[in-house]
Image: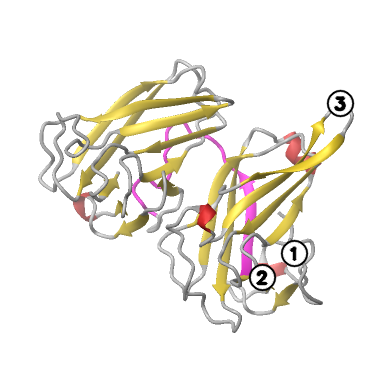
Amino acid sequence: IRNGDSATRSDVTPWLHTKWYGEIVNELKPGEGIDGGNAIAMDRTYHWTGIAQNLNSMCTDAVGGQFYEFNAWMQMTDADGNPATNVDPNKEWWRNMSPILTINDRQYRDASTKEYLYTAEHRDLAAVVRPYSTNEWARVHGIFKMISGSSRLWIELERAPDNVKFILDSASLTPLTCSRDSLVRNGNLETNDSLYWDTYGGDLVLEVLHGAGPNGGHALRSSSRNWYDQTQSQALNIDCVNAGDRIAFSAKIKTSTSCNIYSWDVNQRCNDLQLFTKKGNVHEYHRAGYITADTPDVDGWHHVHGIHVHSENGEKPDLARIYFPDANHNWDVYTAD
């Protein structure tokens, strides 16, 4: 990403507006950046418009299939410059309630003749980190595999509600290496927020609870769940794990109502730790961790452990994520460590 840092920003080039509305499209805002630098402000009317930047396709082709990490800081305001009160990052992206990162990928329908261009939209690659406060800067963050072979590739921050204005600062897109010793990131919530964590399966509330975790640490809670599979989740870079390798998973979980670890009744059973991978058209779901004791510890936490043997279809997948399914959807789910 070019011109992402406000400390050295003197204009808005090469940032774009995906819909032109008037004489001023993107505007430099001296001194309004997150650290007192120069931010970029943009007017918006429709939720499907946003601030964008073309990526150099020679670079993206060279690193296609490798993981990258996106970061940006944003403020959302109404037409008068007041904090927007209708942004909700706990809604799914298609409800158009919170900004997400989309990659727009121009491809040929017939690559042999280079005819019939169309745009493939890869959405929800980054989202707002919780907690979110209307009066503070919001961090938009996510990881994804870089796309290659595109005739044009550009990133776009979009999908906040209609008429919500953006102020952008400190945007970056950097390589994300795979570490075999720490495939899960921010597992102890050491950043004091939900960085690297998001939700899986639909609308649900994601919260970081300070002091509510084991030994007074932090816990992550998902609530307002509408289905058994809907929980907190994390996308993983597992490209350094080969087929046949073993991955040791561990976590601590509990629910707002006591669960029964020996029951398959969906109204009583406890959570597991599940690994999902997608490679081409092959989707795999593996129960990678189970509760290992009859009763929770003295603080009410169930300990989850498991050894997963990595499959051939799971090697270097397009997407991998963990989540904690199967508890009664009327219960809140807590995870830590």
Is residue 177 inside the magenta stretch?
A: yes
Upstream in the sequence, badge 1 or badge 2? 1
Locate residue 118, reporting x and y percent. 77, 42
**Mark 1 closeness class: few <14, some 14–19, many ≥20 residues within 10 Å:** some
Along the line of sight, the residue nearer the viewer: 279 or 307: 279
**Mark 2 closeness class: few <14, some 14–19, many ≥20 residues within 10 Å:** many
Quadrant housing residue 73: bottom right
Callout 3: SS: loop
* Amino acid type, mark 1: Lys
Callout 2: SS: loop
- Could you tell me how far apart the alpha carbons at marks 1 and 2 are, in whole angstroms? 8 Å
Q: Is residue 176 left or right of residue 230?
A: right
Q: Residue at x 60, y 53 (%)?
A: 101
* Amino acid type, mark 2: Arg
Main SS type for the magenta part?
Answer: loop
Along the line of sight, the residue nearer the viewer: 251 or 77: 77
Upstream in the sequence, badge 2 or badge 3? 2
| Region in magenta | 167-190
Q: Which residue is mark 2?
A: 44
Q: Which residue is mark 1?
A: 19
Q: Residue at x 79, y 61 (%)?
A: 14
Q: Which residue is mark 3?
A: 112
Upstream in the sequence, badge 1 or badge 3? 1
Along the line of sight, the residue nearer the viewer: 104 or 141: 104
